[in-house]
Image: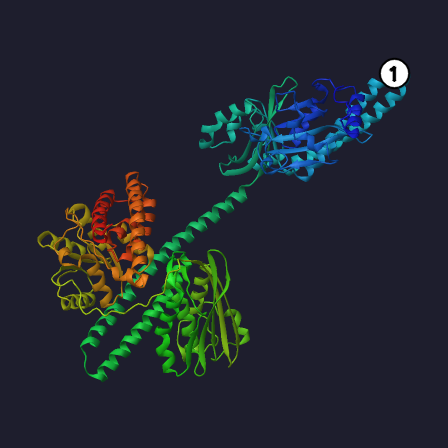
Amino acid sequence: MEFFNEYAPLKEINRLKELLSYNILDTPYEKDFDGLVELISIICDSPVAIISMIDAERQWYKAKVGIKENEVARQETFCQFTLLQDDIMEIPDARLDDRVKNNPHVIAENGIRFYAGVPLKTALGYNIGTVCVVDTKPKHLNSSQKKALQLLTDQAMMLLDARKKNHSLGNEVDSILQTKINLAEKQLQQKENDYNNLLKAIKKSGGVIEFSPDGIIQKINPYFLDLFGYPKKELIGQNNSLLLDEESKKQNHEFWRELREGIHKSGRMKRLHKNGTDVWIQATYNPIYDSENRIIKIIKIGQDITRDVGEEKEVKKAKNSAEALNIQKDNFIANISHELRTPIHAILGFTDLLLEEEKNERKKTYLTSVRTAGDNLLFIINDILDLSKIEAGIIHMDSEAFDLKHVVENVFSILHLKAHQKKITFQHHLPEGLKYYLLGDKYRLTQILINILGNAIKFTSRGSVELFVSFISKSRNKVWIEFKVVDTGIGIPPNKLDMIFERFSQAEDTTTRQYGGTGLGLNISKQLIERQNGFIEVSSELEKGSVFVFSIPYRLGVEIPLYKKVKQERTSRNIEGLRILMCEDNELNQRLTKAILNEAGCAVDLAENGLKGIEFLSTHTYDLILMDIQMPVMDGYQATRQIRNNLHSQIPILALTANFMVAEKQKCLEQGMTDYLAKPFTKEDLLSKIEQLVGSENLKTRKIDQKTKYEPVLDLNILKEITGGDIVFEHEMITLFGTQSKIMMEELEQDIRFKNYDLVISNAHKLKTSFGIIGADLSLLNVLEGISLKDPHETQILTSFTQLKGQMEEIYFALKI
């Protein structure tokens, strides 16, 4: 034959000669193997089973189940690889196997996913074909199925050997041949016994039902009888719908139509017990074909999974309960935040006002003590709320450029007084020539450093507390920063080191009484460090001191020339003459805020709830509304919706709330409020926020919903500080701003037109950085960045963008670009 040429490997030539010796090279599909291949399909729970021969160019089928073709090109087969080994080859998921993942039968729609095959090996050791099973779903054969497949392959080979001997021997050796045949029959009988025992084992370990193609129950094993609670006589001859609930019956007609078309079915299914209770099974439905390729019955094999489903439901129920408890916990945190921070706000605010007016040094000392106590109380409350936010997964990590040296120096300026009062050395050590700007959350880094350094100062009565900062590794765009805090304090006992980062944990039971604190600082710091993909460790020696080391990876920011910030004391605010409506039910907060605003020259009307505020708005004109959230009769959210939707007013509304969680701020903006200020706030915080919203002469009478020209506010001193007075560099920065901002404005306009609000938020945030360099007002960009993706206010977005374009024209005019 043509494949017997000088280029064919000798081993392959010998294999093909052995194949020819069986006198079956050109023999088509044969019925002798039908029962065998059908049994293979059932045992392996696979819709396709094949007994085939393979020559140099093709694979053709001696017997098959679940497939129409009679042969296939060898290079397209899985079995070409089975020929290369001596035992079973299994491919659980063909898409993941490098040998066949690009096979046309794999990449086709509803292609092959599972394959298992065993080579047909002759007595001389040559593999001339295969016995295999195929499925369109990934899976594994269990050990019993693999054993059965090997046994059936042996049986197929014995049948082939018997046929070969029958063809090759003449009449003169009939007696010998008959002896061999008898032996083969005995072996076959033994194999059949093995198969029967194997099938009995399957029936004992699982349920088996045999249906007619129309779904009539013809046979059922005891496993399913016990599971469904019926005697055998009540099920035989009944339609399968007897076991279905009303919902399942709706899909049953289509289900059986597909089975009659030869579509294999499997999955988790609900059935009914005789007493009406639910029974869950994991089952497969296998269409069985006769010799003429007609479906003659459906065999269902299943396992009881009712207990598993019940446990899953209990787990889901428990999960839902846990989620409900988390919601309750969040609400509790919000309420506690409001109830605690509101009176503290009043205490700190009135104390600050008295400190500004008081001249008596003795009284000022008392007031300073009150202020310190209030700050400490606020610090404890913030610790508890921070911990709750971290646990709830709602803590937010910012990513912005910051000067590492400035952060460290700022922390030391905050803690310096405490160390000075204890007369201990307090110093930091930074790398020489530090010029790095980092991208990350500088506020969380500040919080971590204050916690750890503050702890070190607290527990050190003599000696020193020192911070060492170093770069431990650096890549092209990322750097690991190591912070080491070394103190000469009381130290930590060895048996307490493992628990020092646990919440409410301190080294000794007397520590809280002697030194104070909540025992939360280190736990919060550890969680904040780990949330930034960092790590922390501690070493200590009792009475000699402790060393805390933590490392955090940061991305590298843009390296720009360092500059010194000049602190400017603001002696006055440009808000005199503003008319402000304050909606607040707490009398202390009313008095405090009104005192601050009256001193700044503002006229203030007080409304004890949102409804009263609406009444004021119907008869008075205001420049700004200060809106508390939790009020009786009508809360701040309801009042804001009334103002925006019913009164159609766009007057700036500043939310004043004791809940400082990120979700609360987002909710305020979504409800239509202009900005947000968390209590307790300082006098400077409040006045600065008001000035930002409505604080210039031109803004006093301007209404946002009127079509007036936006007056941009520029502060080029910021740019001058960055450029260090370099005029050329300053001009380059302004030119770059002009180029980039025009591109971003075009992108913003396109994104708003096509309602790609996630991109609007992103570009508004990017543009804020450029605005910061030239000291431009950020109010309109804050509105665009605060868009709610769930409920975007499209009219407000379009209005804000139109005003932003006017602002940009003024900026370009001022910068001459």
Judged from this view, the residue extending furthest toward the left is 619
The answer to whether 396 is drawn above or below residue 40 in the figure is below
The answer to whether 515 is drawn above or below residue 222 in the figure is below
Secondary structure beneath label 1: loop
The answer to whether residue 520 of the structure is visible from this angle is: no
Judged from this view, the residue extending furthest toward the front is 728
Asked if residue 35 lies left or right of residue 741, the reply is: right
The answer to whether 803 is drawn above or below residue 388 in the figure is above
Q: Which of 287 and 398 lies nearest the eye of the viewer?
A: 398
Q: Position of residue 109 (x, y in %)?
A: 53, 28
Q: Position of residue 611 (x, y in %)?
A: 16, 54
Q: Which of 500 and 512 lies nearest the eye of the viewer?
A: 500
Q: Which of 161 and 586 lies nearest the eye of the viewer?
A: 161
The answer to whether residue 250 of the structure is visible from this angle is: yes
Asked if residue 605 lies left or right of residue 80, the reply is: left
Number of numbered discs overlaid on the protein picture: 1
Q: Quadrant of the N terminus?
A: top right
Q: Determine crowd level at label 1: few under 14, some 14-19, many 20+ residues with C-alpha closer than 10 A.
A: few
Q: Which of 334 and 789 lies nearest the eye of the viewer?
A: 789
**Residue name at image x 52 percent, y 38 percent:** 279
The answer to whether 610 is drawn above or below residue 746 in the figure is below
Instruction: State the scheme by which the image is colored.
Output: rainbow
**Residue name at image x 8 percent, y 53 percent:** 619
Q: Position of residue 659 (x, y in %)?
A: 30, 60
The quadrant in which residue 626 appears is: bottom left
**Residue name at image x 48 percent, y 80 percent:** 490
Q: Position of residue 526 (x, y in %)?
A: 46, 65
Q: Amino acid at mark 1?
A: Gly
The residue indicated by pointer 1 is 170
Judged from this view, the residue extending furthest toward the right is 172
Asked if residue 552 lies left or right of residue 226, the reply is: left
